[in-house]
């Protein structure tokens, strides 16, 4: 007799397939984000391979792995033991450090490049400013920082998938996201806010959001959210000009900056 309280071999296989597909999809997305980071850095004539790189908040190590594959000596740093264990499984040869991005364990002038990919929005604004000061200190003179951060005006909040939620004042959206997102609060940015932060820290900064936005507009395969994909397809089908599409995409897109010490 089959005990329905226990998983059957078939259900286990299906769950494993789903988990494997999810991991493959995440790896593909992170690899594409790593390509964006390297592309943006190269647009500034930054010779990334000439020095060490640090991937702050490396998670499962996909971005770190990609940079290593491009011949860039890269160290991954994360506060999560579980994430670093998964990163080590993904690539056993990665150099990984268990530490907080808000308390970086490095001497000044240690890195040529720092990657801050989808991390800043998970740190409160005060700690984010403190971390940015530390990053500037550990960079070489003329070293570069790549930032990818969630936009306050994204149409769909990426963790709860709620529409327009972060368009509200923080005191209204914050308790909702805290309740629905088990990894804590969310601190999205606007282009103006990020630029002001970079200026305050002393970074020379350039906005490369158009890189992310143009990929989404001109190739639907890069859009993970089905609703957003349908909306962009609709706008393309009604022959909205690429110039207008790109303008709109930049307003609601993930924000990309490259900063120089």
Image: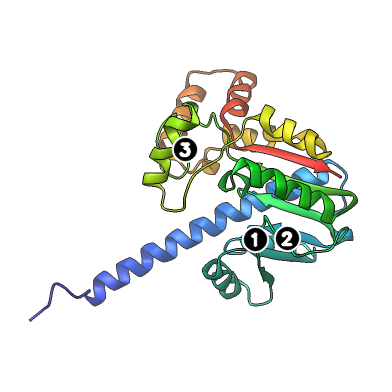
Crowding at label 1, few (<14), some or many (≥20) Cα neighbours within 10 Å? some
Question: Which residue is tagged 1?
Answer: 100
Q: Nearer the viewer, mark 2 or mark 3?
A: 2
The mark that comes first in sequence, 1 or 3, is 1
Question: Which residue is tagged 3?
Answer: 157
What colouring does the structure picture have?
rainbow
Label 2 and label 1: CA atoms lie apart by 6 Å
Q: Position of residue 100 (x, y in %)?
A: 64, 61
- Residue 125 is left or right of residue 185, and the answer is right
Question: Which quadrant of the figure contains the N terminus?
Answer: bottom left
Residue 213 location, quadrant: top right
- Residue 60 is left or right of residue 200, and the answer is left
Q: Give the vertical position of 111 relative to 119 (above or below).
A: below
Residue found farthest to the right? 141
- Residue at 58% of width from left, 69% of height from top? 84
Q: Secondary structure at mark 2?
A: loop
Crowding at label 3, few (<14), some or many (≥20) Cα neighbours within 10 Å? many
Q: Position of residue 245 (x, y in %)?
A: 58, 23
Confirm or deny contact between disc 2 and disc 1 (CB under 8 A). Answer: yes
Question: Which residue is tagged 2?
Answer: 104
Q: Position of residue 119 (x, y in %)?
A: 61, 50
């Amino acid at each position: 007799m089959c005990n329905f309280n226990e998983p059957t071999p078939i259900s286990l296989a299906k769950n494993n397939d789903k988990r494997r597909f999810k991991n493959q999809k995440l790896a593909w997305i992170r690899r594409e984000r790593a390509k964006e980071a390297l592309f943006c850095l190269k647009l500034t004539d930054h010779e990334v391979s000439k020095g060490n790189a640090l991937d702050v908040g490396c998670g499962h190590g996909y971005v770190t792995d990609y940079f290593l594959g491009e011949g860039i000596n890269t160290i991954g740093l994360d506060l999560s033991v579980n994430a670093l264990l998964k990163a080590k499984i993904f690539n056993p040869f990665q150099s990984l450090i268990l530490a907080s991005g808000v308390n970086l364990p490095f001497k000044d002038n240690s890195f040529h490049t720092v990657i801050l990919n989808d991390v800043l929005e998970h740190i409160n604004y005060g700690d984010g400013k403190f971390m940015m000061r530390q990053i500037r200190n550990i960079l070489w003179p003329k070293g570069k920082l790549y930032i990818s951060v969630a936009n306050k005006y994204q149409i769909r909040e990426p963790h709860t998938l709620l529409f327009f939620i972060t368009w509200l004042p923080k005191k209204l959206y914050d308790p909702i996201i805290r309740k629905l997102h088990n990894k804590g609060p969310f601190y999205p940015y606007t282009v103006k806010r990020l630029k002001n932060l970079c200026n305050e820290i002393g970074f020379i900064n350039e906005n490369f959001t158009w890189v992310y936005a143009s990929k989404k507009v001109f190739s639907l395969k890069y859009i993970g959210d089905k609703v957003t994909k349908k909306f962009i397809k609709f706008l393309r089908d009604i022959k909205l000009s690429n110039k207008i599409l790109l303008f709109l995409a930049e307003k609601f897109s993930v924000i990309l900056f490259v900063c120089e010490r």
